Amino acid sequence: MNRREAISSVALLLGGTILGAEAFLSGCKTKSDLGISFSPTDVSFLDEVAETILPATSTPGAKAAKVGEFMTVYVRDCYEEKDQKVFMDGMKKLDEASKTKNGKSFVDSTPEQRHDLLVSLDAEAKAYQKSKKEEDPKHYFRMIKELTLFGYFTSEVGATQALRYVAVPGKYEGCIPYKKGDKAWAT
């Protein structure tokens, strides 16, 4: 047995042990046990919100990276139930805020109206963050904004077209000259 085979065997053994223990401890929850589902309308709504946060410019926007779909998977699979509820309620609150401010739903609003609404919600989220207690949940807009950025910059579109990407990076260079306007590195 060579070293590569030994490492693979150990990784398989440890991975199985860790995954098996997690399933045992969590009671083998399946996705359907969590009680949350997103409709295609929800996905397109989240795409529109994400596209307003990261619009297409000289690089593709959040909609091209399918950030709405990413958010639904991440919320369903990775968020705790209380955070899922905040997120789902937040989608409704965002649309209600648009109806109150613009007289129409977020999707039916103009790009300028969408932008202005999200700027005001961002200010609200920052104020909430400053005054919230440790046990208070995150503000729903902060969750949406964080997932938008995370989903975009970890997508193929975001990493290869919005950032500088080297598929197989060379040696580590801790100090590379940076000129204003250069893209950040993805790798």
Image (cartoon, rainbow, N blue to C red):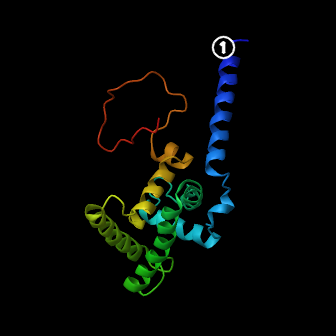
Q: Please tell me how many numbered marks the rendered image carries.
A: 1
Vertical order, 77 against 180 (above or below) = below
Q: Position of residue 52 (x, y in %)?
A: 44, 66
Residue visible at 53% across and 67% down in the picture: 46
55 vs 5, nearest the viewer: 5
Residue visible at 30% across and 63% down in the picture: 132
Quarter of the image with the N terminus is top right
Residue visible at 45% across and 43% down in the picture: 163
- What amino acid type is highlighted by mark number 1? Arg
95 vs 14, nearest the viewer: 14
- Which quadrant would residue 63 be assigned to in this image? bottom right
Q: Position of residue 172 (x, y in %)?
A: 42, 23
Q: Position of residue 49 (x, y in %)?
A: 47, 67
How crowded is the residue under tag 1: few (<14 C-alpha within 10 Å), some, or many (20+)? few
Residue visible at 40% across and 84% down in the picture: 102
Instruction: Identify the residue at the far right of this view.
Output: 1
Residue topped by disc 1: 3
**Is 105 situated left or right of 15 in this image?**
left
